[in-house]
Structure formats: C-alpha cells, structure tokens
Amino acid sequence: MAAPDAPSPGEADAPRRRRRGRAALWWTPVVVVLVAGLLAAGAALGDLRDRPPGESSVDVGFARDMSEHHAQAVQMAMIEFDRGGDTSTRSVAQDIALTQQREIGVMSAWLSGWGRAQSAAGAPMRWMGGTGAAAGGGHDAHGDTGSAAMADMAGMNGTVGGAASAGDTARMPGMATPNELRRLATIHGRDLDVLFLTLMVHHHRGGLAMAQYAAQHAGSDRTRSLAKAMVLNQSIEIDQMQEALARLGAPRA
C-alpha cells in the first residue's frame, strides 16, 4: 500500500511544468527582440541596396541625357514614317520610334522613383567621367574607330547641308542640328529617306558612346542592363540603315 502522503505522478510533474512554463515566458520576449532585430537589419540592408543614385551619378545622368537623345530620334523617325518614300525605311523608322519611346518611359519612371528631376541645367554628359563628347572612343557598330564616328563624337556631323553655322550646333554627339531638322521637315520621298537614314546612323553612333559608358560604369544593375540592350539594338539598326542607304543608291553614312 502506498504511503498516504506520497504525491501522485501528475502532482510530481507539476513543479517541472511550471518551471518550463516560466522559462518559456522568459525566452519569448528575447526571441521577439531577436526576430525584430533581424527584420530591422534586413530592412536596413534593403534600404542601402535600393538607395537612389546621387544627382551626379552615371545612372541619373544617363537617364536624363539618353531620354533627350531618344526624344530627337523619335521626332525624326515620325517624320520619316509620315512622309518617307521607301516602305522598308519607314518600317525601320517606326521600330525606332516605338522602341525609343518605350525606353524614354522606363528612364522617366526611374528618375521619378529616385526623386530626381527629369532634366538638369548645364552642359550634358558631365556624368561621363569628364570625357565629354569623346567618351566611348567613337566606335561604330563594328567596334572600329573611323573618321565618320570621330566626327560624330566631336559634334561635327552637323555638316550634311554645308559649312557649320550657328544652326549647325548639336547639343550632344550624334544629335541632328536645328538646320538638319528643318531640312528633314521640308522634304519628301527618297530625299527624305536618304537624309533620315544618314542622320539616324550618326545619331545612333552618338547614342552608342553614351550607352557603352553607362553599361560599364553605372551603379545600378537595371541601368547597365538597359544600356547593354541599347548597344545591341542600335548596332543592329546601324547595319540595317547602312544597307538601306546602299539599296537606295546613296553613300554610306
């Protein structure tokens, strides 16, 4: 017979359960604090990773200047699409307008998300490490450094209509001058096709220099990826437009 004052098994386990319960209650806030700390640390790392690029960064400068560069390409492409005489060239112009307008939208959204203005006062291309118009070395679609490409990089390709003048100054390498844009807007048919193709080859070469620099030096993966895509697409389009000029019996640009 069991002693009358011996505790039952359940009563014997009760103190141990109470101690485990008190231990669990003691560890709970510690775990909560640790988890909260880890989450906060993760959020801080995310903030560092997603921190907007600086005002003078390659990313911001590229987005601004390439958007402006693209805007002129869209303008010229729409003139050709509207009044050009060669169906194939008009199709190329349409592709350029659609692609570059979409890329303008992407870069504009980046600038807004970074809290940066869409444009900035002062000279363009300061983000290219002080290399200015010579950045990219004037490489054409095949990586060669020829006189035509070097002329583009120096802003000298605005002489299609003759000697340089106040209206022959391009804002960035490859961009058409005010005089060239006025001429483009007043001609039709084959003459328009040839001038459009010539100006757009120069324009793409200037854009390639900017995109090549951004692809190598931008801080954001998405900026570098877009710049690399531009290099590929515009190189292909340069080849297409050179072939179109030969087919139309015009000199290569």
Image (tube, helix red, strand yellow):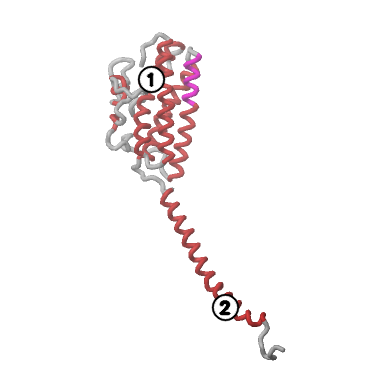
Q: What residue does disc 1 label? A: 199
Q: Is residue 20 above or below residue 170?
A: below
Mark seen at residue 44: none
| Residue in view at x 56 percent, y 72 percent | 24
Q: Is residue 240 above or below residue 228?
A: above
Other residues around mark 2 within 10 Å, as few (<14) / some (14–19) / many (≥20) = few
In the rendered view, does 96 fall on the left or right side of 180?
A: right
Distance CA(mark 2)–CA(mark 1): 84 Å
- The residue at the far front in this view is 1
| Residue in view at x 31 percent, y 18 percent | 159
* Mark 2 or mark 1, earlier in chain: 2
**Residue 100, image x and y in percent?**
46, 29
Other residues around mark 1 within 10 Å, as few (<14) / some (14–19) / many (≥20) = many
Comparing labels 2 and 1, the label whose residue is closer to the camera: 2
**Residue 139, image x and y in percent?**
32, 25
The answer to whether residue 248 is magenta is no
In the rendered view, does 157 fall on the left or right side of 187?
A: left
Residue flagged by tag 2: what amino acid is it?
A: Arg
Q: Nearer the viewer, residue 77 or 44?
A: 44
Residue flagged by tag 1: what amino acid is it?
A: Leu
Q: Nearer the viewer, residue 75 or 95?
A: 95
- The residue at the far bottom in this view is 4
Q: What residue does disc 2 label? A: 19
The answer to whether residue 91 is magenta is yes
**Residue 176 in view here:** no
**Residue 172, image x and y in percent?**
34, 29
Which span is picked out in magenta?
Answer: 87-97
**Residue 55, image x and y in percent?**
36, 44
**Residue 247 in view here:** yes
